Amino acid sequence: MKHLGILLSGRGSNFLAIADAMDRGQIEGADISIVISNRAEAAGIAAARARGLATQVIEARGRKRAEQDAEIVACLREHGVELVCLAGYMRLLSPEFIAAFPNAILNIHPSLLPSFPGLDAQAQALAYGVGISGCTVHFVDEQLDHGVIVLQRAVPVLQGDDEEALSARILEQEHLAYPEAISRVLSGNYAIVDRRYVARASQNAALIEEAK
Ligand code: GAR
């Protein structure tokens, strides 16, 4: 059994989509061993508790990021976590945190990266006037919303969309994308070639060999 650790800061709908997909058997051989929030009042942490999952609140409380992250890493280790999933976790990770879980931290972002990283991605997309947006699941590296992309799902931006309407359309795709990406990563059936995620399908074997 592979153990997942979820980090969240708010509503927790992506966490719930992952938990539901697991309950439906769509993420095989994995469980959620700990849900951590940096905010005690996050609805997501209450939802995790209600599902009977182990939870922990680890707040910043004016501490240095490295100190808070060390506590989070210790908690993840204590629960045997192999894959960390950021699900609306609105804090940057320290380099020490990232180094503690090499290629084993995923994030979901509500835009088609590299467009519109950072806060309010949906509002950024509307303000820019793009016709297509979506969501990205990616590995986390030291740069904001930057790591290797595991998968993306696109949605149209419609005339008359406001931030709420576009966010809802993207969120629906996030809830499909995140479980699928977790499943792919847990299968181990991929290689990272330069900064590309390459599935180990037969047509990619040569590409993967070449990169070794
Ligand atoms: C989601 O839309 C997620 O993509 C976004 O926060 C929301 C969390 O919702 N994350 C980011 O913007 C990270 N840069 P949720 O708490 O309902 O999963």
Image: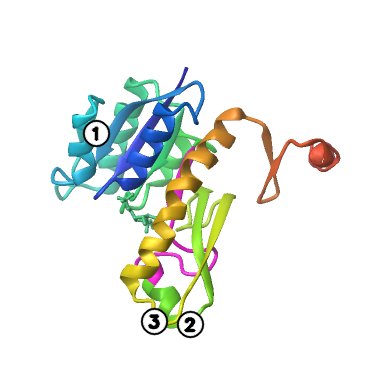
Depth order, front residue of 73/81: 81
Residue at (24, 42) in percent of width and height = 44
Q: Which of the two labelled residues, at mark 2 and mark 1, occupies the earlier sequence position?
A: 1
Q: Which residue occupies the foreground of this view, 6 or 157? A: 157
Q: Is mark 2 within 8 Å of ligand 1?
A: no
Q: Is residue 107 left or right of residue 67?
A: right
- The quadrant of the picture occupied by the C terminus is top right
First reached walking from the N terminus: tag 3 or tag 1: 1
Label pair 2/3, CB-CB below 8 angstroms: no
Q: Which mark is residue 129?
A: 2
Residue 88 seen in the current view: yes
What residue span does the magenta drawing correspond to? Answer: 105-122
The answer for how far apart the CA atoms under marks 2 and 3 are is: 11 Å
Q: Are marks 2 and 1 in contact (CB under 8 Å)?
A: no
Label 1 CB, ligand 1: below 8 Å? no
Q: Circle 3 is placed at which residue position?
A: 160
Tell me residue 41's x, y (percent): 13, 46
Q: Secondary structure at mark 2?
A: loop
Magenta stretch: includes residue 111: yes
CA separation, marks 3 and 1?
Answer: 36 Å
Q: Which residue is mark 1?
A: 48
